[in-house]
Protein backbone atom coordinates (compact mmCIF):
# COMPACT_ATOMS: atom_id res chain seq x y z
CA UNK A 1 0.00 0.00 0.00
CA UNK A 2 1.25 3.48 -0.86
CA UNK A 3 1.00 6.30 1.66
CA UNK A 4 -1.25 8.17 -0.79
CA UNK A 5 -3.71 5.27 -0.62
CA UNK A 6 -4.23 5.93 3.08
CA UNK A 7 -5.58 9.42 2.44
CA UNK A 8 -7.80 8.20 -0.40
CA UNK A 9 -9.14 5.51 1.93
CA UNK A 10 -9.78 8.18 4.56
CA UNK A 11 -11.85 10.24 2.11
CA UNK A 12 -13.90 7.18 1.20
CA UNK A 13 -14.42 6.36 4.88
CA UNK A 14 -15.60 9.90 5.62
CA UNK A 15 -18.12 9.76 2.79
CA UNK A 16 -19.38 6.36 3.92
CA UNK A 17 -20.00 7.67 7.44
CA UNK A 18 -21.72 10.82 6.17
CA UNK A 19 -23.96 8.77 3.89
CA UNK A 20 -25.02 6.81 6.95
CA UNK A 21 -25.42 9.86 9.19
CA UNK A 22 -24.81 13.44 8.03
CA UNK A 23 -24.05 14.46 11.64
CA UNK A 24 -21.71 11.54 12.35
CA UNK A 25 -18.57 13.62 12.90
CA UNK A 26 -20.41 16.41 14.70
CA UNK A 27 -21.72 13.81 17.13
CA UNK A 28 -18.27 12.22 17.46
CA UNK A 29 -16.74 15.58 18.36
CA UNK A 30 -19.09 16.02 21.32
CA UNK A 31 -17.04 13.63 23.45
CA UNK A 32 -16.61 9.98 24.33
CA UNK A 33 -18.47 7.70 26.68
CA UNK A 34 -16.93 4.23 26.20
CA UNK A 35 -18.16 1.23 28.16
CA UNK A 36 -14.89 -0.69 27.69
CA UNK A 37 -11.17 -0.23 28.24
CA UNK A 38 -9.36 -2.68 25.96
CA UNK A 39 -5.71 -3.53 26.68
CA UNK A 40 -4.37 -5.52 23.76
CA UNK A 41 -1.26 -6.49 21.87
CA UNK A 42 0.33 -4.14 19.32
CA UNK A 43 0.26 -6.95 16.73
CA UNK A 44 -0.98 -5.56 13.41
CA UNK A 45 -3.35 -8.52 12.92
CA UNK A 46 -5.42 -7.78 16.03
CA UNK A 47 -7.51 -4.59 16.02
CA UNK A 48 -9.89 -4.02 18.91
CA UNK A 49 -12.69 -2.30 17.00
CA UNK A 50 -12.83 -4.97 14.29
CA UNK A 51 -12.82 -8.06 16.51
CA UNK A 52 -15.31 -6.51 18.96
CA UNK A 53 -17.57 -5.14 16.24
CA UNK A 54 -17.67 -1.66 17.78
CA UNK A 55 -17.59 1.87 16.42
CA UNK A 56 -15.34 4.86 17.24
CA UNK A 57 -16.22 6.18 20.69
CA UNK A 58 -17.35 2.82 22.09
CA UNK A 59 -14.03 1.44 23.38
CA UNK A 60 -10.95 3.11 24.89
CA UNK A 61 -7.85 1.31 23.60
CA UNK A 62 -4.31 0.76 24.86
CA UNK A 63 -1.91 -1.58 23.05
CA UNK A 64 1.62 -2.74 23.76
CA UNK A 65 3.82 -5.75 23.03
CA UNK A 66 2.15 -8.85 24.53
CA UNK A 67 -0.67 -6.87 26.23
CA UNK A 68 1.17 -6.31 29.51
CA UNK A 69 -0.13 -4.45 32.58
CA UNK A 70 3.13 -3.42 34.18
CA UNK A 71 2.83 -1.30 37.32
CA UNK A 72 5.96 0.72 36.47
CA UNK A 73 4.77 1.51 32.93
CA UNK A 74 3.35 5.02 33.28
CA UNK A 75 1.66 4.73 29.90
CA UNK A 76 -0.62 1.83 30.76
CA UNK A 77 -1.14 3.07 34.33
CA UNK A 78 -2.21 6.49 33.03
CA UNK A 79 -4.62 4.87 30.57
CA UNK A 80 -6.15 2.75 33.33
CA UNK A 81 -6.58 5.69 35.70
CA UNK A 82 -8.02 8.01 33.05
CA UNK A 83 -10.47 5.51 31.60
CA UNK A 84 -11.61 4.10 34.96
CA UNK A 85 -11.71 7.25 37.08
CA UNK A 86 -12.65 9.88 34.49
CA UNK A 87 -14.36 8.11 31.58
CA UNK A 88 -16.04 5.70 34.03
CA UNK A 89 -15.71 2.54 31.94
CA UNK A 90 -17.43 -0.47 33.48
CA UNK A 91 -15.44 -3.25 31.81
CA UNK A 92 -11.66 -3.59 31.49
CA UNK A 93 -10.45 -6.22 29.04
CA UNK A 94 -7.01 -7.73 28.62
CA UNK A 95 -6.93 -9.39 25.20
CA UNK A 96 -4.05 -11.57 24.05
CA UNK A 97 -3.84 -13.63 20.87
CA UNK A 98 -2.51 -17.04 19.91
CA UNK A 99 0.84 -17.16 18.12
CA UNK A 100 1.94 -13.93 19.82
CA UNK A 101 5.46 -13.00 18.75
CA UNK A 102 6.16 -11.23 22.03
CA UNK A 103 5.40 -14.33 24.08
CA UNK A 104 7.42 -16.51 21.71
CA UNK A 105 10.38 -14.13 21.95
CA UNK A 106 10.22 -14.22 25.75
CA UNK A 107 10.70 -17.99 25.68
CA UNK A 108 13.92 -17.82 23.67
CA UNK A 109 17.26 -17.97 25.49
CA UNK A 110 18.46 -14.96 23.55
CA UNK A 111 19.62 -11.44 24.36
CA UNK A 112 17.02 -9.17 22.74
CA UNK A 113 18.50 -5.88 23.92
CA UNK A 114 16.00 -3.21 24.95
CA UNK A 115 13.21 -5.82 24.82
CA UNK A 116 14.78 -7.83 27.68
CA UNK A 117 13.21 -5.95 30.64
CA UNK A 118 9.82 -5.85 28.93
CA UNK A 119 9.77 -9.53 28.04
CA UNK A 120 10.98 -10.46 31.52
CA UNK A 121 7.40 -9.89 32.67
CA UNK A 122 6.32 -12.81 30.47
CA UNK A 123 9.19 -14.96 31.70
CA UNK A 124 7.92 -14.27 35.23
CA UNK A 125 4.53 -15.63 34.20
CA UNK A 126 6.26 -18.79 32.94
CA UNK A 127 8.13 -19.08 36.25
CA UNK A 128 4.89 -18.87 38.24
CA UNK A 129 3.24 -21.57 36.10
CA UNK A 130 6.31 -23.60 35.07
CA UNK A 131 5.05 -26.94 36.37
CA UNK A 132 1.90 -26.77 34.24
CA UNK A 133 3.75 -25.43 31.20
CA UNK A 134 6.68 -27.85 31.35
CA UNK A 135 4.19 -30.73 31.40
CA UNK A 136 2.94 -29.68 27.93
CA UNK A 137 5.16 -31.48 25.42
CA UNK A 138 3.88 -29.87 22.21
CA UNK A 139 5.73 -26.57 21.77
CA UNK A 140 2.91 -24.68 20.03
CA UNK A 141 0.42 -25.83 22.66
CA UNK A 142 2.81 -24.71 25.41
CA UNK A 143 3.22 -21.25 23.87
CA UNK A 144 -0.51 -20.84 23.43
CA UNK A 145 -1.17 -21.89 27.02
CA UNK A 146 1.43 -19.35 28.16
CA UNK A 147 -0.49 -16.73 26.15
CA UNK A 148 -3.64 -17.60 28.12
CA UNK A 149 -1.76 -17.54 31.44
CA UNK A 150 -0.15 -14.22 30.54
CA UNK A 151 -3.62 -12.72 29.99
CA UNK A 152 -4.70 -14.16 33.35
CA UNK A 153 -1.71 -12.65 35.18
CA UNK A 154 -2.23 -9.25 33.55
CA UNK A 155 -5.82 -9.35 34.82
CA UNK A 156 -4.42 -10.03 38.29
CA UNK A 157 -2.12 -7.03 37.86
CA UNK A 158 -5.16 -4.91 36.99
CA UNK A 159 -7.04 -6.05 40.07
CA UNK A 160 -4.05 -5.04 42.23
CA UNK A 161 -4.52 -1.37 41.29
CA UNK A 162 -6.36 1.19 43.41
CA UNK A 163 -8.44 2.50 40.49
CA UNK A 164 -9.84 -0.94 39.67
CA UNK A 165 -10.56 -1.86 43.29
CA UNK A 166 -12.27 1.48 43.88
CA UNK A 167 -14.44 1.26 40.75
CA UNK A 168 -15.40 -2.35 41.50
CA UNK A 169 -16.57 -1.32 44.95
CA UNK A 170 -18.39 1.82 43.76
CA UNK A 171 -20.09 0.64 40.56
CA UNK A 172 -19.30 -3.04 40.00
CA UNK A 173 -16.58 -2.63 37.37
CA UNK A 174 -15.35 -5.99 36.08
CA UNK A 175 -12.09 -7.24 34.57
CA UNK A 176 -12.15 -9.71 31.67
CA UNK A 177 -9.48 -11.86 30.03
CA UNK A 178 -9.87 -12.73 26.35
CA UNK A 179 -7.77 -14.44 23.70
CA UNK A 180 -8.17 -13.84 19.96
CA UNK A 181 -7.58 -16.89 17.77
CA UNK A 182 -5.91 -15.52 14.63
CA UNK A 183 -6.56 -18.80 12.79
CA UNK A 184 -10.33 -18.76 13.21
CA UNK A 185 -11.18 -15.16 14.11
CA UNK A 186 -12.86 -16.36 17.31
CA UNK A 187 -12.75 -14.27 20.46
CA UNK A 188 -12.39 -16.58 23.49
CA UNK A 189 -13.48 -15.56 26.98
CA UNK A 190 -11.15 -17.03 29.62
CA UNK A 191 -13.85 -16.34 32.22
CA UNK A 192 -11.63 -14.57 34.72
CA UNK A 193 -13.17 -14.83 38.19
CA UNK A 194 -12.81 -11.26 39.48
CA UNK A 195 -14.17 -11.94 42.97
CA UNK A 196 -11.99 -15.00 43.55
CA UNK A 197 -8.83 -13.20 42.41
CA UNK A 198 -9.69 -10.17 44.52
CA UNK A 199 -10.25 -12.33 47.60
CA UNK A 200 -7.00 -14.22 46.98
CA UNK A 201 -4.87 -11.09 46.82
CA UNK A 202 -6.67 -8.81 49.27
CA UNK A 203 -4.39 -9.63 52.21
CA UNK A 204 -1.43 -8.16 50.35
CA UNK A 205 -2.84 -5.85 47.70
CA UNK A 206 -5.93 -4.30 49.29
CA UNK A 207 -5.87 -0.52 48.77
CA UNK A 208 -8.28 1.62 50.77
Image: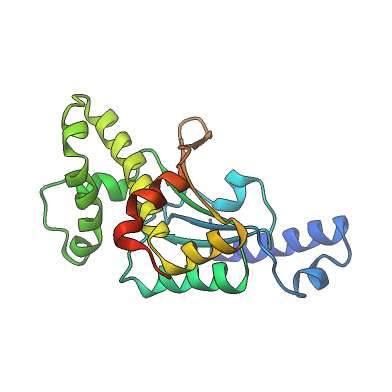
- Return the residue nearer the eye: 204 or 178: 204
In the rendering, at what x and y percent does residue 177 appear? 46, 45
Q: Is residue 194 left or right of residue 122?
A: right
Q: How is the image coloured?
A: rainbow
Q: How many numbered discs, if any?
A: 0
In the rendering, at what x and y percent does residue 147 appear? 33, 41
| Residue at 46% in and 35% down | 181
Q: Is residue 184 above or below residue 28?
A: above
| Residue at 46% in and 47% down | 195
Quadrant in the picture for the C terminus: bottom left
What is the residue that sits farthest to the top in this orientation? 137
Q: Is residue 13 left or right of residue 52?
A: right
Q: Is residue 198 left or right of residue 18?
A: left
| Residue at 40% in and 65% down | 161
| Res 30 → quadrant | bottom right
Q: Is residue 29 above or below residue 160?
A: below
In the rendering, at what x and y percent does residue 179 appear? 45, 40
| Res 146 → quadrant | top left
In the rendering, at what x and y percent does residue 185 appear? 53, 35
| Residue at 42% in and 42% down | 97
Amino acid sequence: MKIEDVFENNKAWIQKKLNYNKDYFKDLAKGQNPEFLYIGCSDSRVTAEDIMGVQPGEVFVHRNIANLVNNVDLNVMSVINYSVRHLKVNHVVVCGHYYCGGVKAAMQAKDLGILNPWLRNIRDVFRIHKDELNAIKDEDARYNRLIELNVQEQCVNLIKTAAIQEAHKERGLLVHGWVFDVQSGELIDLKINFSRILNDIMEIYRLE
